[in-house]
Image (cartoon, rainbow, N blue to C red):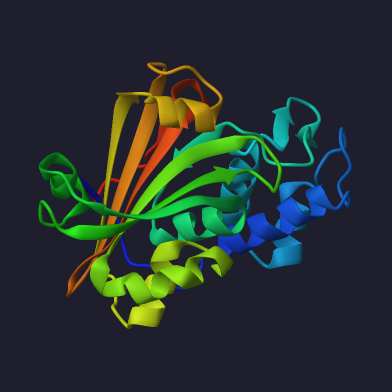
Amino acid sequence: MNKVEPIGHMPRYLQILATLRARVEDGVYPLETSLPPESELCEEFGASRYTIREAMRRLVEQGMVHRRQGSGSVVVAAQPQARYVHSLSSLADLFQFALSTHYEIVGVESVALSEDRAALVGGEAGSTWNLIKGVRRMHAGGEVVCYIHSYIPKRLSRLVGELPGCVGPFYALLSKRAREDIIEADQEIRGEPMTREMARALGRKPGDPSICALRRYTSAKGTLITSFNWHIAENFLFQMKLQKNL
């Protein structure tokens, strides 16, 4: 599994991304118009070209902006599009994704972990966990980005009732309210055929290919939350940036 660094202050490019995206959504930058050039944005935000380019790259990934030769960065959509580009470098990226999309809980139940599921969740086979089922959309009422199963240990059952009003990702609320710092976040990405339940939520047929992003957050007391995030395979793009250690 890939190790993810703990969340700290939100990176500058994410702050700029949020501002630019809000301007597009509010019509400050209308459809088919060009965003200001990099030099202007650098001056406005007091940021480097690298930072501005990273924010712009995220707008392109979200399908809101398209780079056209001779025209710069042109607004092509007022809302993020359903295609999900998974480009993750820190928990701050996941935090921003949760803030900028819309999550709906569709079911809450208590389940006993099977042996196979326990190995993935990070619990003991036969132990009782809270299972939260939900869908994430690009915006309220919009197209579904992914279908989610989140497993929360019994020791945190008292916090499950707070999740429907949660702003941001569940792991952040659980960590804060339980006073359990996240010491490790693991991620695993795999291909899986859709079950009937997944297909119904994603508007596809059972057996269609999906991509599952499994994320497990761990504190000193054990698993804090484990989430299975199923995406339509053709709508999912995974990107990873590696840097050479000098």
- Which sits in the foreground, 106 or 145? 106
- Which sits in the foreground, 215 or 152? 152
Q: Position of residue 107 (x, y in %)?
A: 47, 50
Q: Residue at x 65, y 35 (%)?
A: 143
Q: Residue at x 79, y 27 (%)?
A: 70
Residue 171 to residue 26: above or below? below
Residue 87 to residue 111: above or below? above
Q: Position of residue 206 (x, y in %)?
A: 42, 18
Left or right of 186 in this view: 35: right
Give the number of marks: 0
Q: Quadrant of residue 20?
A: bottom right
Residue 87 to residue 207: above or below? below
Q: Quadrant of residue 157?
A: bottom left
- Which sits in the foreground, 194 or 87? 194
Q: Residue at x 69, y 39 (%)?
A: 142
Q: Position of residue 11 (x, y in %)?
A: 51, 64
Q: Position of residue 223 (x, y in %)?
A: 22, 63
Left or right of 80 in this view: 57: left
Q: Is residue 239 visible?
A: yes
